[in-house]
Image (cartoon, rainbow, N blue to C red):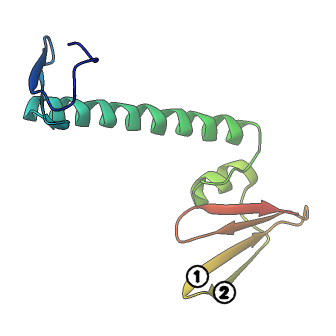
Amino acid sequence: MDFDEPLSSSRIVFVGGCGVIILVIGGLFFMGERARKHEDTMAAELAAKTAEAEAQKREAAIAAKQVLVGMTREEVERAWGKPDRTDRSNINGGVREQWAYDTGFYVYFGPEKVTSVGR
C-alpha cells in the first residue's frame, strides 16, 4: 500500500495469516469481522497477562509482609494478619472501611479492595 496516495482513493488491504481486511474509502477505514475478532483476542490476551502480572506482584508483596493498593481483604490478612480494630463510615454515598493495626498502620478499603495505606 502506498501511503502517499490521496485519501480520496479507495483501496483494500489484506494481511494474510490472521485474515485482516481493511477497506479504505475516501479516507474512512472499515475493518472486516476477522480483524475485529483478532483485535478483541489481542486485547483479551493483554488483559490476562496484565492481571497475571498484578497477581504476581501482590503475591510477592504478601511474602514480604507488605500491603499494596488494589489488594483484597484476604490478601491484607495474609500479609499483616487480622486487624486490631475496624471502623466503617459512609463517605459520599459509599462505605469506607478502615483496618487499624497496633503497629500504627491503617488500611482503607473501598467496596472490595485497598484504596490507601497509611500511618
Closer to us: 42 or 57 = 42
Please give the residue where the numbered disc 1 appears in the rendered image: 95
Q: Amino acid at mark 1?
A: Val
Q: Residue at x 57, y 61 (%)?
A: 113
Q: Amino acid at mark 2?
A: Ser
Please give the residue where the numbered disc 2 appears in the rendered image: 89
Residues under numbered marks 1 and 2 in contact, where contact means CB atoms less than 8 Å apart: yes
Local secondary structure at mark 1: strand
Residue 49 screen position, x and y as percent: 43, 31
Local secondary structure at mark 2: strand
Mark 1: few/some/many CA within 10 Å (<14, 14-19, 20+) = few
Q: Residue at x 31, y 37 (%)?
A: 44
The answer to whether 55 appears left or right of 85 in the picture is: left
Q: Residue at x 59, y 87 (%)?
A: 92
Residue 70 screen position, x and y as percent: 60, 54
Residue 66 screen position, x and y as percent: 76, 45
Q: Residue at x 69, y 50 (%)?
A: 68
- For the image, the number of numbered tags is 2
